[in-house]
Image (cartoon, rainbow, N blue to C red):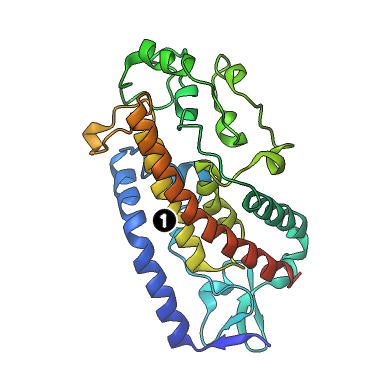
């Protein structure tokens, strides 16, 4: 039997969710009004294509119905009215079962492996390797070591990226220098829990469960992804001192040690979120 929340209860939950999400989205909204860009705080919205309005919207998840006037949810299209109230349309899950199962298995396989922490964030360096200043992804921000110094760092290391969606942005000159050639076909075989991008993607996998998943978990995953992105850019070749970001100088032994320490902290947070996501996917799949 589904749980029906009275209108006062679910509106309070929705308000708490909005209040928690607001600090993450306020800056994005303001920058868009002025045409400004931020390489850390805008990234999750642009890369994952999930708007501030969607992030701030609470969903009750499967097994919960909204009592009273829930017309704003009925208008979303992914909800329907049941005998006890308005809830996510469970009939739609069947059409997404294969995709949900693929993601669930990816998460479980990733969790089953040992974490590797020997990449030192060099994926961002590989994305600008041997590029002209005009071609650099974040051309508004200077390279700390300049183009030649950046290339020298890449050439002094073995690239060990295991994540397909980082590797696919490597420059043509950098890709052959990687120890692996991650692809969509090998993703479930290669993804490992020490990878910062695998941790960041937990937000994407939580996002895929909307409106059936846990909205608290979605924001928990967003918070981790935001912190991962900050480390990503602090360890990147860009000089973001004007934004208040102290670089993690992975080209030095001390910088490598700092990066690995922070990487392990993020991986530990990701492990708990990954476990909760697997349980959430299992809960949703049980409704299909």
The vertical placement of 255 against 80, above or below, is above
For residue 218, side relative to residue 101 (left or right) = left
Is residue 121 positioned above or below 4 on the image? above
Residue 81, given in percent of the width and then of the height, sits at: 65, 80
**Side of 40 where 47 appears, left or right:** right
Give me the residue at 36% from left, 27% from top.
253
Residue 122 placed where, x, y %? 47, 28
Q: Which residue, given by chain and number where applicable, does mark 1 sit on?
A: 223
Q: Which sits in the foreground, 73 or 137?
A: 137
Q: What element carries label 1?
A: helix
The part of the image, by quadrant, that contains residue 108 is bottom right
> What is the tally of numbered marks visible in this picture?
1
Q: Residue at x 47, y 81 (%)?
A: 10
Counting from the top left corner in percent of width and height, residue 93 is at 72, 65
Check the image and report above or below for 87 versus 37.
below
Categorize mark 1 by other alpha carbons within 10 Å: few (<14), some (14-19), many (20+): some
In screen coordinates, is 138 left or right of 48?
Answer: left
Residue 54 appears in the rendering: no
Q: Which image quarter: residue 176? A: top right
| Residue 218 location (% of width, % of height) | 50, 61
Q: Is residue 205 visible?
A: yes
Q: Closest to the observer: 81 or 232? A: 232
Residue 47 vs residue 87: left or right?
A: left
Instruction: Tell me the quadrant of the picture where the N terminus can be found.
Output: bottom right
In which quadrant will I find the C terminus?
Answer: bottom right
């Amino acid at each position: 039997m589904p749980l029906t929340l009275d209108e006062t209860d679910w509106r309070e939950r929705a308000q708490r969710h909005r209040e928690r999400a607001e600090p993450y989205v306020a800056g994005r909204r303001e920058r868009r009004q002025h045409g400004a860009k931020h390489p850390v705080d805008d990234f999750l919205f642009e890369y994952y294509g999930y708007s501030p309005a969607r992030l701030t919207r609470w969903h009750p998840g499967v097994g919960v119905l909204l009592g009273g006037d829930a017309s704003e949810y009925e208008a979303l299209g992914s909800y329907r009215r049941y005998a006890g109230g308005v809830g996510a349309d469970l009939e739609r899950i069947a059409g997404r079962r294969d995709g949900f199962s693929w993601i669930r298995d990816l998460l479980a396989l990733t969790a089953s492996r040992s974490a590797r922490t020997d990449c030192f964030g060099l994926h961002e360096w590989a994305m600008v390797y041997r590029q002209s200043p005009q071609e650099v992804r974040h051309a508004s921000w200077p390279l700390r070591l300049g183009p030649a110094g950046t290339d020298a760092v890449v050439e002094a290391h073995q690239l060990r990226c295991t994540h397909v969606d980082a590797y696919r942005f490597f420059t043509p000159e950098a890709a052959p220098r990687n120890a692996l050639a991650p692809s969509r076909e090998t993703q479930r075989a290669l993804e490992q829990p020490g990878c910062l991008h695998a941790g960041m993607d937990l937000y994407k996998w939580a996002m895929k469960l909307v409106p059936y998943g846990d909205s608290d978990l979605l924001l928990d995953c967003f918070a981790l992804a935001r912190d991962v992105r900050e480390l990503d850019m602090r360890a990147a070749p860009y000089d973001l001192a004007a934004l208040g970001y102290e670089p993690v100088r992975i080209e030095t032994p001390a910088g490598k040690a700092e990066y690995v320490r922070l990487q392990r902290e993020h991986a530990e947070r990701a492990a708990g979120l990954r476990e909760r996501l697997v349980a959430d996917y299992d809960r949703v799949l049980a409704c299909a």
